[in-house]
Amino acid sequence: MERFTQRARRVLSLAQEEAERLQHGTIGTEHLLLGLMREEGGVAGRVLQELGLELRRVEELVNRLTDADSRTGVGNPDLSEGTKKVLELAVDEARRMGHHYIGTEHLLLGLVRQQDGIAIEVLRRLSISPEKFRRQTRRVLSESPVQKTTPPERPASRRGDKTPLVDQLATDLTALASEGKLDPVVGREIEIERVIQVL
């Protein structure tokens, strides 16, 4: 969870709020999409705005596509299997891009790679292809003056700054992963479990 930026964490929190507001028993991909739309300050928010997505229209489609059976009342919703897969794909997107953080842009790209779920159906009905999201995200990132190893927003940390030794070890592992010398599956389960615990 340390690699998730503050904005990415906020998106996950907003997704949980959306699931609770709609009284759904799980946090689905549709809630993640709504969370990305509500977090307007991040890269994903900018991409969604530039592609013309309107929150009200997306909410209407989500309400139409979710059935009454998904309403369970109050409680803490868990992550759906689809949302867990989106988080795995987001980690993979960050790795592929050579980023040492997971931001809203990685969540968005993971979301459009997940071909099952209500979110992708909403996007299909709005006639926006996953490739449009990828192109627009690349364009927004290329316009950003931020280097690819530095997150556009500072990663959240629960315990303050790390020691230089830990920073060095983390950089070494990331370098190994980017060179393809570290199994890309290493660490994913732990990150996903941490996200689940936080939510």
Image: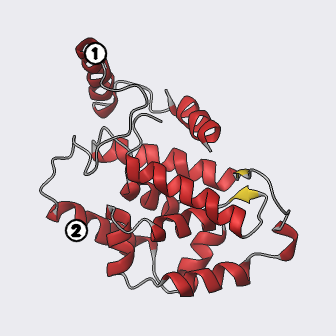
Q: Are marks 1 and 2 in contact (CB under 8 Å)?
A: no
Quarter residue 136 falls in: bottom left
Number of numbered labels in the structure image = 2
Asked if 41 appears above or below 97 in the picture, the reply is below
Residue furthest to the left: 145
| Amino acid identity at mark 2 | Arg
Of the pair 159 and 175, the residue shown nearer to us:
159
Q: Which of pointers 1 and 2 lies earlier in the amino acid sequence?
A: 2
| Amino acid identity at mark 1 | Thr
Q: Residue at x 85, y 62 (%)?
A: 72
Task: Residue 70: give x, y in percent of width and height.
Answer: 82, 67
Q: CA distance from mark 1 to mark 2?
A: 35 Å
Task: Residue 154: give x, y in percent of width and height.
Answer: 29, 43
Residue 29 circle label: none
Q: Residue at x 84, y 63 (%)?
A: 73
Q: Residue at x 22, y 40 (%)?
A: 149
Of the pair 110 and 18, the residue shown nearer to us:
18
